[in-house]
Amino acid sequence: MLIVVVIMLCGIAVGYLVRKRNTRFISHVITVLIWLLLFLLGIEVGSNPHIVNGIQTLGIEALLLTVGGAIGTTLFSWLLWKYVSRKEAGK
């Protein structure tokens, strides 16, 4: 964890030193690096037999969490809308 913090602080220092230079290309570099990290993560996950063997269970759990989150968000948004509408009508 200390290494991560030190690397982040080094990045902040470099960013401070080059703040007045043209750094538009950095967003493209960051995008490519994120794609590379996602690809490597996919390789790591695909090579792990425990994850590959349990993908059906993980898929069902992910589906249930997604549906539950969507239903909960919709329900509480509707309740908040009703509460706000009632409060504004009472003004």
Image (cartoon, rainbow, N blue to C red):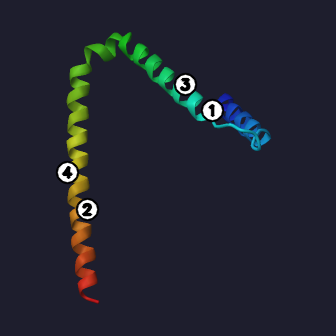
| Residue at which label 4 appears | 71
| Residue at which label 3 appears | 33
Disc 1/disc 2 C-alpha distance (Å): 40 Å
From the image, which quarter does the C terminus lie in?
Answer: bottom left
Disc 2/disc 4 C-alpha distance (Å): 10 Å
Mark 1 / mark 2, whichever is N-terminal: 1
Q: What's under tag 4, amino acid-wise?
A: Ile
Element assignment for label 1:
loop
State the image quarter where residue 56 is shown.
Answer: top left
Taking 63 as reference, is 86 above or below it? Answer: below
Q: What's under tag 3, amino acid-wise?
A: Leu
| Numbered disc in front, either 1 or 4 | 1
Element assignment for label 4:
helix
At 28% from the left and 75% from the top, the residue drawn is 84
| Residue at which label 2 appears | 77
| Numbered disc in front, either 4 or 3 | 3
Callout 2 touching callout 4 (CB < 8 Å):
no
| Residue at which label 1 appears | 25
At 50% from the left and 20% from the top, the residue drawn is 36
